[in-house]
Image (cartoon, coloured by chain):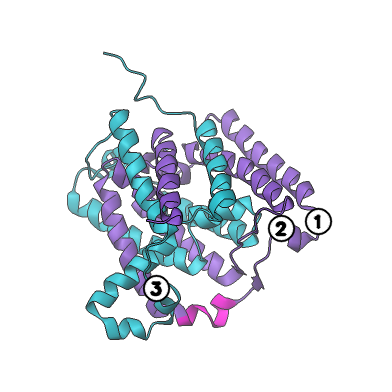
Amino acid sequence: MYSRRGLPWDPYISGALAGLLAVASVALLGKFFGASTTFARLGGALESSVLPQHVQTLSYFQKYPFKMDWQLMFLVGITAGAFLASVWSRTFRLTLFPDMWKHRFGTSPVKRSITAFIGGILAAFGARMAGGCPSGHGLSGLMQMSISGYISLICFFLGGIIIARVLYGRRDEA
Amino acid sequence: MNTELWGGLITGIIFGILMQRSEVIRYDRQVGAVRLIDMTIIKFMLSAILVGTVGIYQLRELGMIALSVKGTVVGNNVVGGLIFGAGWALLGYCPGTAAGALGEGRLDALIGMLGMLLGAIIFAEVYPYTQTGSLALGNYGKITLPDLLGADPWLLIVGVSVIYLLILYTVEKLKL
């Protein structure tokens, strides 16, 4: 039976609603959207369970100690919201391989896992150096017309375009 | 749980639903953007930023909120930004969308999130070196475009909005 449930929502309307949500979050709780700080806090907590003395010496983790905070719950909420929406729309799919990746690189689990893991390392490392990710620098930064937001977001895309070109070639090739 | 934690959870759930249903948490949409073949995430982000900029500056003018601007350090922003972009293209998700992609069953997003924990641990080791030398160049503090240009924020909001609309107009023209 044909269902409209699986059809994607319009990105302009969804984006505008996300903008209203971000404004409401600042108005009601004083919280701007962001995500990468939580990975720093969790990384520090993980490392201090193995090397507690060493973590004591790291000024970065002293600056970002582990805590249950707004942003951690925001990320948990994103996972929960995406889960609910995907089940409701019947678009939940347990898979290791995005379609575009499969088309270009096939279904080697090792290849996809290593690429995703290295990508994650670089993404968090770079976001922490830049001081934020596409949520904190991109959405929250540009909403405030922050100079660091403009510089970082442009560089996110530049870095992405270069590596995507390496992986997928010119756009008319793949 | 207190109000702050509940607020984060509820905000995240709504944001997760919006991102899942508009498909911006998908690898294909994000890598599609950096391959310059699918601008769905640009439409989503710029729409949010257009609405958000007006809202944030209106609330600020009413004295209801204070801005929370991240410091500009050109060396860190540029080098960190480029490294982030490289990782983003390899993984296909950013920190926020990885959390969403995991929710819709994408296991590569989970592996990427484990990589992010290691990436943060590695960054903590080198953090002192990013605070000196060429990476620390261009430290302008927490500045905004109105601060930099000494212009009225509303004039600049009109200006950046026109630029965003021109980008979206071009994207639609090119059917991306």
Left or right: residue A11 versus residue A75 is: right
Q: Quadrant of the C terminus of chain A?
A: top left
Q: Name which residue type carries label 3.
A: Pro
Residue B147: image location, x then y, percent: 75, 62
Are the residues tagged 1 and 2 within 8 Å (C-beta)? yes
Query: Judging from the image, what secondary structure is the residue with disc 2 in?
Result: helix
**Residue that badge 2 annotates:** B145
Tag 1, which chain? Answer: B
The kind of residue tagged 1 is Ala
Q: Residues within 10 Å of mark 3 (few under 14, many from 20)?
A: some
Q: Helix, strand, or loop for circle 1?
A: loop
Farthest residue, direction top: A1
Residue B135 part of the magenta-drawn span:
yes
Q: Are marks 3 and 1 on the same chain?
A: no
Examine the image and state in which quarter residue A70 appears. bottom left
The numbered mark 2 sits on a residue in which chain? B
Residue span colored magenta: B128-136
User: For the residue carrying disc 2, how many other residues have a C-alpha within 10 Å: few (<14), some (14-19), or many (20+)?
Assistant: many
Chain the render paints purple: B
Q: Distance between the Cα atoms at labels 2 and 3?
A: 31 Å
